[in-house]
């Protein structure tokens, strides 16, 4: 069970039931549970889609695409069954928010799945939970079973005449499965290898039927939008960046934790006020603003609003909400190496630029960090990363290339300090490389 | 090959959740591994037969997922995260400590079969780093001293 934190600047929407015992269905009902789905039953498909569109809700998994827009791509008439798929394969390093949603408010996810189903005319939803989160899969299984007993799921939900089934599904360890087309492959019982697009899942998804795929936090936000209204939700954040976000603060901070803050919250304030600043009087060196795949920001680049558009303007991405803070003692080459080791491990090997690129970059970074680097390596690593961009079926190749390019561009001097057999200036005496490196 | 009643009840229910049989494969493999310790030839044959797949189809899937293993492991699989958020807060030192303490390296198993050790990728505990999973249980905000207590706890449990 992960510890909860709080800060006065928090605006609790998705996290408002955290720590309140809402895994219990009666308690959830006391806390306005399942009211949104009953309201949605009377809104009609267009009514729901427009409400979510107007709320400015954008995908919390990382891409930041308009949720209402995504739903509107599902054809009204389809020859095959339509599906809703909740992505709970949370695996982006730096990200640990969906875990809290499943742990504290599983019924909100179920409610979000049903509302998404009503919006697109689907009758079946799946909630995919990553394999490592076994205790959460158990919580979700119980929540679904409880909802069936009350008639909130199954035939004729809430006496509406509408049938809707929700099923749980567990993974078995794979970062790439968090990518939506690989997620469908995994759910179908296969290796999680991405599918070519188009056709997009909204048209051809699970078993060939139109499929809506949303992140768990996105779906858990939907009931609040239906109940509170699009206008209220949109007003919590800057234009086109509606609502709040669960920011996962980690790394060199005095008070790491998952905090729900309005979209557009200042990054400097997030680090120094909400997260309590850097321990032991050390200085900030860099921030990874949205999970390991987002380009790093230097300490003088953090006066930005944490919303999709502002972070994009600063050359990075809001991503999945994982804010990783690095103090002055961090070796950026080592950090780049650990990041690449991850992507090399997780690359499925389907696309050559990703499979070969991540492996080559990892090997080069290991040699480089150990003092065996030559000047030419620095440009070669940048050039190779650049050539991985946009040349793979799924964004894993981009996710490995983008941060690498930023590390080199912004911290070139640190790479140069490792050249000519010099030992890593940050390495503590006696600390050996980890076994996988 | 016999699985527990709980496994069979769950399997019978899961198979009704999908339009085809194959989708139960990944979760079923993990539940089977929980009971058998690892995915032996016998387990693979059994699951393949139930789902009308070939053993090769099943092996092909197993090799993709990092949690699935075709080799026996310790009763307690100690999985130390060294990914970025954990690394910044001592994940690598923690791994090294576990290696010394248990006398085994990455993917190794102690001679008594009690513990195995694995360096793993992000387990979703970034805000509570450094973190370790022992089988499915999370242990967070760890120090080497806390880790010793965690390991001692499992050693006692395993001996009981």
Image: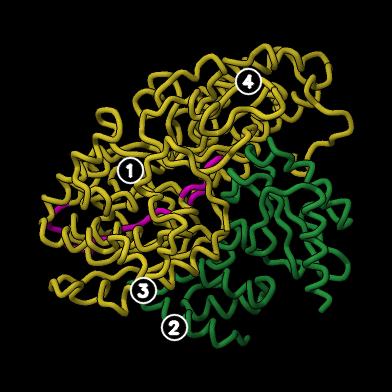
Chain colours: A yellow, B green
Distance Cα–Cα, label 4 vs label 1: 39 Å
Residue farthest to the front?
A: A8
Q: Which residues are magenta?
A: A75-97
* Badge nearest the viewer, 4 or 1: 4
The answer to which of B73 and B149 lies nearer the viewer is: B149
Distance Cα–Cα, label 1 vs label 3: 27 Å
For the residues bearing labels 4 and 1, Cβ distance under 8 angstroms: no
* Badge nearest the viewer, 2 or 1: 2
Distance Cα–Cα, label 2 vs label 3: 10 Å
Mark 2 burial class by Cα count in 10 Å: few <14, some 14-19, many 20+: few
Residue at 55% of width from left, 21% of height from top?
A406
Left or right: A90 as drawn, with respect to A132: left
Residue at 41% of width from left, 59% of height from top?
A105
**Could you tell me residue B111's position as x and y percent?**
88, 67
Label 1 sits on a secondary structure element that is: loop
Viewer can see residue A84: yes
Report the residue marked by disc 2: B12
- Asked if badges 2 and 3 are on one and the same chain, I answer yes
Which numbered dot is residue B17? 3
For the residues bearing labels 2 and 4, Cβ distance under 8 angstroms: no
Residue at 39% of width from left, 56% of height from top?
A17
- Asked if badges 3 and 4 are on one and the same chain, I answer no
Mark 3 burial class by Cα count in 10 Å: few <14, some 14-19, many 20+: some
Mark 4 burial class by Cα count in 10 Å: few <14, some 14-19, many 20+: some
Q: Quadrant location of residue A354?
A: top right
């Amino acid at each position: 069970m992960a510890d909860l934190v709080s800060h006065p600047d928090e605006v609790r929407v998705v996290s408002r039931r955290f720590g309140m015992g809402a895994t219990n269905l009666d308690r959830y009902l006391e806390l306005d549970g399942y009211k949104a789905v009953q309201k949605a039953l009377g809104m009609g498909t267009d009514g729901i889609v427009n409400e979510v569109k107007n709320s400015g809700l954008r995908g919390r998994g990382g891409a930041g695409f308009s949720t209402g827009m995504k739903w509107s791509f599902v054809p009204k008439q389809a020859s095959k069954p339509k599906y809703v798929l909740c992505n709970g394969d949370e695996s982006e390093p730096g990200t640990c928010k969906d875990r809290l949603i499943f742990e504290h408010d599983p019924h909100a996810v179920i409610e979000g799945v049903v509302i998404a189903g009503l919006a697109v005319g689907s009758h079946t939803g799946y909630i995919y939970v990553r394999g490592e989160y076994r205790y959460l899969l158990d919580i979700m299984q119980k929540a679904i079973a409880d909802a069936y007993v009350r008639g909130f799921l199954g035939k004729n939900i809430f006496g509406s005449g509408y049938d809707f089934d929700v099923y749980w599904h567990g993974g078995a360890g794979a970062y790439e499965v968090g990518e939506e087309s690989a997620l469908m492959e995994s759910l179908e019982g296969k290796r999680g290898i991405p599918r070519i697009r188009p056709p997009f899942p909204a048209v051809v998804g699970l078993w060939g039927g139109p499929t809506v795929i949303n992140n768990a936090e996105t779906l858990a936000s939907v009931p609040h939008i239906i109940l509170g209204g699009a206008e209220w939700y949109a007003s919590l954040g800057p234009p086109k960046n509606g609502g709040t976000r669960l920011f996962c603060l980690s790394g060199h901070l005095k008070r790491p934790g998952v905090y729900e803050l309005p979209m557009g919250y200042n990054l400097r304030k997030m680090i120094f006020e909400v997260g309590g600043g850097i321990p032991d009087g050390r200085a900030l060196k860099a921030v990874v603003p949205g999970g390991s795949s987002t380009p790093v920001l230097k300490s003088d680049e953090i006066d930005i609003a944490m919303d999709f558009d502002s972070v994009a303007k600063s050359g990075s991405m809001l991503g999945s909400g994982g804010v990783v803070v690095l103090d002055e003692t961090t070796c950026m080459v080592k950090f780049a190496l650990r990041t690449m080791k991850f992507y090399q491990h997780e690359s499925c090997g389907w696309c050559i630029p990703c499979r070969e690129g991540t492996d080559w970059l990892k090997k080069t970074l290991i040699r480089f960090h150990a003092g065996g680097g030559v000047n030419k390596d620095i440009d070669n690593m940048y050039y190779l990363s650049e050539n991985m961009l946009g040349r793979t079926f799924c964004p894993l190749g981009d996710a490995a290339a983008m941060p690498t390019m930023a590390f080199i561009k912004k911290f070139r001097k640190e790479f140069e300090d490792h050249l000519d057999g010099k030992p890593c200036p940050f390495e503590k005496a006696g600390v050996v490389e980890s076994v996988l490196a | 090959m016999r699985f527990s009643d709980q496994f069979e009840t769950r399997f019978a229910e899961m198979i009704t959740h999908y339009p085809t049989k194959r989708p139960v494969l990944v979760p079923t493999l993990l539940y089977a591994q929980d009971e058998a310790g690892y995915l032996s030839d016998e387990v693979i044959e059994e699951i393949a037969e139930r789902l009308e797949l070939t053993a090769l189809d099943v092996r092909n899937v197993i090799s993709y997922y990092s949690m699935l293993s075709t080799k026996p492991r310790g009763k307690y699989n100690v999985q130390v995260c060294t990914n970025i958020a954990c690394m910044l807060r001592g994940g690598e030192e923690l791994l090294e400590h576990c290696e010394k303490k248990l006398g085994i390296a990455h993917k190794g198993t102690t001679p008594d079969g009690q513990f195995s050790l694995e360096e793993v990728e992000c387990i979703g505990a970034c805000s509570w780093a450094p973190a370790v999973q022992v089988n499915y249980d999370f242990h967070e905000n760890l120090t080497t001293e806390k880790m010793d207590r965690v390991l001692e706890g499992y050693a006692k449990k395993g001996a009981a």
